[in-house]
Image (cartoon, helix red, strand yellow):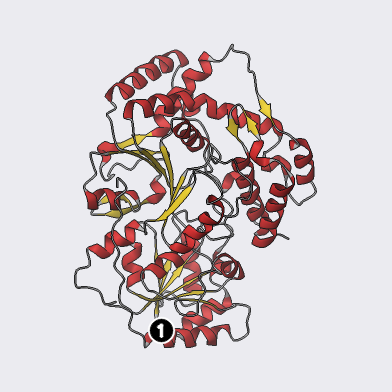
Amino acid sequence: MFTQQNIKDIILDFEDKYPVDTWVVNGVHVWPYVRIKIYIHALVLMNKNGLTQSEILPNNESYNKQLLKKTSKVFLIFKAKIKLLLFFSNLKKKQIVFFGSHIHRVLYDDKYFNRFYDSMIDYHHLQNDVYMMEYQKIHDATYNKKAVIPLKEYLGYHKLLSKIKNKFKKEINVLSLNSYDIFYKELGKYNFNLSALGVSEKEITDWTNRLNLTNDFFDKFYKKVNPSKVIFLGYYGLDDIYSALLVANKLNIDTIDFQHGPQTNVHLAFAFWTKLPNKGFNTMPKTFWNWDKESKESIDEWANKTNTVKSKVVGQPYIAYWTSKLGKKEKREKQYIFYSLQTTPFNIEDLLTPKIVKLIHQNKYHWILRLHPRNNLNLEALDNFLGANNLKEKCTVQDAISSPLPEVLNNSMAHITNYSGCLIEARLLNVPTILINVVGKEMFNQYIDDKLVFYLDQNNEEFVENVGRKLEAFSKLSFKTKKTNVFNPIE
């Protein structure tokens, strides 16, 4: 049985015993990829949800495979060449290239608005200074759509042409994997599903070849656009993002990971990198922009040991953007309890346990049940559950797109969660949070101060009464919305 601490101990033991900082395949540092895959895989096993790792990380299906089902290959090749020619010829120089997804967007003034990037773009009038690389679906009503590039489409054309071009080339791989075979054998001693994990020598070699298939696309793109910064909302998980990151690092463009969720000291994509090259891994960003000092400290603990990796606190731009429009309207108008629901591995019964149902019934407040941006709950089943437990009058189910998170949080008396990153956003707004899951206690231990962040064990027999007392105490307090500046990414 894995725990967050146990997972960390296993990975740090690997870093201590093996020369992970020297593992390079075809010019690509592979340890960040391997380490994060192990971390995510172990989290899946910890939650015993039966999912494969591919269901947690984004899907890498190539666009051209879908196209080939619809049209002939000859026509598609011709189309791909024309599309790419027009694409590259129409590119203009921009200061920043942002990489993001539709899951980062919310509805704002009837447009799908990237809550992290567009908050800065709109506030500082940067619409003509940026490109937005969207790597999943594109909404029709997208804010600043002229700056949006459908990466999946154009990269799909490039992959098709590259595969044809390389079809008869002999693949020559250059590997520097001292002791990797011993490491891989040791992996088998743990409760890992090695076939699902996908980090054998052959599999990581194939991974680097997939990156090299798209490197030319990003090289040509960056040289034409000439950005000073390339910014990612999560640098890991997608092959195409790794490739974009790898090429930008090679061209000495400032590569930045912009915090989009919890970056606590147990999140091993961001914390406790104990062995890395002096100049950092070429498959990791060189700069990390953080919401708060605690997140920055998780980065600094290891980044300060390198010559190139740095971090800074820039705040949460969506919250800063929203509070900048408040004017004098600072007081909270309604007494809601904001309950941030989670996605995999939780189901409805995990989130609305008998104790939570009892808690909702026994207090006088209305509850907002906020769905996760990647919600996996069956909404009809959730509605039936609320009806069967007589909770419909006490609860409102709210998606993550239609209502601005800062507004709903700001109008809430308290935030309750298992371990959602909304904790940090609530804290930035001076909204108290109650953690109710031991994983949350482990993840956010550095935030628990019994002032704005509390932990109450749901397994405690007096849990309902303990939470009730906290909520009653919160109702007597007067919280003022904290305002912060919207960070300018060009500065």
Image quarter where the N terminus lies is: bottom right
Residue, x 25% and y 74% (percent of image)? 330
Task: Give the amino acid at mark 1.
Answer: Phe
Residue 72: give x, y in percent of width and height. 45, 16
Circle count: 1
| Front one among 203 and 220 | 220
| Front one among 254 and 354 | 254
Q: Please identify the quarter of the rendering in which residue 290 is found.
A: bottom left
Q: Is residue 463 positioned above or below 147 on the image?
A: below
Relative placement, left or right, of 84 versus 330 is right
**Which residue sits furthest left?**
328
Residue beneath disc 1: 474
Q: Can the viewer see residue 229 in this picture?
A: yes
| Front one among 332 and 424 | 424
Residue, x 53% and y 87% (percent of image)? 465
Q: Can the viewer see residue 262 in this picture?
A: no
For mark 1, give the secondary structure: helix
Residue 270: give x, y in percent of width and height. 54, 52
Q: Is residue 57 positioned above or below 89 on the image?
A: below
| Front one among 179 and 392 | 179
Residue, x 44% and y 30% (percent of image)? 251
Residue, x 30% and y 49% (percent of image)? 118
Residue 56: give x, y in percent of width and height. 57, 49
Residue 193: give x, y in percent of width and height. 72, 46
Q: Is residue 280 positioned above or below 340 on the image?
A: above
